[in-house]
Image (cartoon, rainbow, N blue to C red):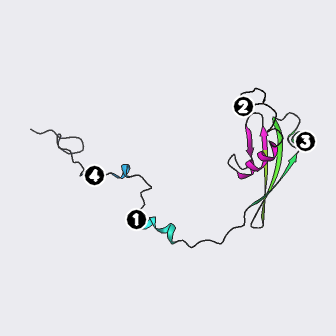
Amino acid sequence: MTRVNKSGGKTGQTSRKPEGRSKARRGGSGKTAKGRGRAAERKPEAKQSPARFRVRELNAQQKCGPGTSVERLFRVDETADGLPKAHLVFLDRRHGWYCEHGVECPAVGHARRIGEAGSQHNGRTHNGGMRA
């Protein structure tokens, strides 16, 4: 007498897929060869003018209040293709540098460059000792 599984198949008989690479091991996004060539088919877009950034420091105590943990506040005006976009970049004791649009916003780097310009050469080495 043969034993039957709940699925209806007999035990001891497993249906195996033929040997070879499975989709999980292949890697990639699972796109077909037809879909991979699309990037090459795209026409080059018109060159965009590089974004311009203007950084101004604001009074953090005045804008955020007297009990704030914000140490420094910058307004970064970004102009790309004639479209202005304003950013507020904060240096916070708890959270570090961030923009209202997120930590990865390009305005953070521009504000940091301005904000840390005076503190780069304080006469100390990376381990805290004085330079010779």
Mark before the other along the chain sequence, 3 or 4 = 4
Residue 62 has which mark?
A: 3
Q: In which quarter of the image is residue 29?
A: bottom left
The residue where tag 2 is placed is 126
Mark before the other along the chain sequence, 3 or 1 = 1
Marks 2 and 1, how far apart in space?
A: 51 Å
Q: Is residue 129 left or right of residue 24?
A: right
Q: On screen, 5 above or below 25?
A: above
Please give the range of residues in magenta.
Answer: 90-116
What kind of residue is marked 4? Gly
Q: In this view, does 85 lie to the left or right of 59?
A: left
Marks 2 and 4, how far apart in space?
A: 54 Å
Residue 78 has which mark?
A: none
User: Where is residue 36 drawn, in percent x and y?
Assistant: 45, 64
Which element is circle 2 on?
A: loop
The residue where tag 4 is placed is 20
Which element is circle 1 on?
A: helix
Residue closer to the observer: 45 or 103:
45
User: Where is residue 21 drawn, in percent x and y?
Assistant: 31, 52
Quarter placement of the C terminus = top right
What kind of residue is marked 3? Gln
The residue where tag 1 is placed is 33
Marks 3 and 4, how far apart in space?
A: 67 Å
